[in-house]
Amino acid sequence: MKWQLQRNKLLQAASSIRIYDVPDWADIAYQLGYSSQQHFISDFKRVLGKTPAQYKRELRDPASSIRDQV
């Protein structure tokens, strides 16, 4: 149950990242109840497989995902 709540929070973060041109990582972390930006980034990467910045970069340039894998 706790994992599902965390996953939903991080999916909400992903949605916020898609909306903003320049996301404020600390503000997003704070809004989701994280006590630190680093904790938010670590959880995001563990659940979604990439950091929030990597996620945003891939939204801007989908080819970067392919380059990162090579």
Image (tube, rainbow, N blue to C red):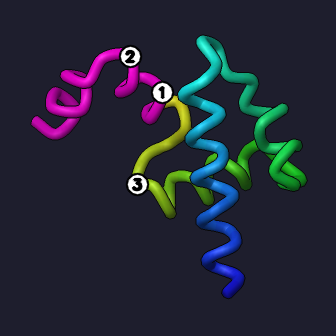
Range of residues picked out in magenta:
54-70
Q: Identify the amino acid type marked 2.
A: Arg
Looking at numbered disc 3 in the image, what kind of residue is underneath it? Gly
Q: Which mark is residue 60?
A: 2
Q: Secondary structure at mark 2?
A: helix
Element type where label 1 sits in the image? helix
Image position of 37 (left or right of 68): right
- Residue at the outermost left position: 70
Q: For the point 24% across and 32% down, which residue is it?
A: 65
Q: Which residue is mark 1?
A: 56
Locate residue 63, reporting x and y percent. 19, 22
Tell me residue 68's x, y (percent).
22, 33
Toward the bottom, the furthest residue is 1
Q: Where 10 sits versus 26, above or below? A: below
Q: Earlier in the sequence, mark 3 or mark 1?
A: 3
Task: Tell me if mark 1 has few (under 14), some (14-19) or many (20+) residues whose alpha carbon lies within 10 angstroms of its own.
Answer: many
Discs 1, 2 touching: Cβ within 8 Å: yes
| Residue 63 covered by magenta stretch | yes
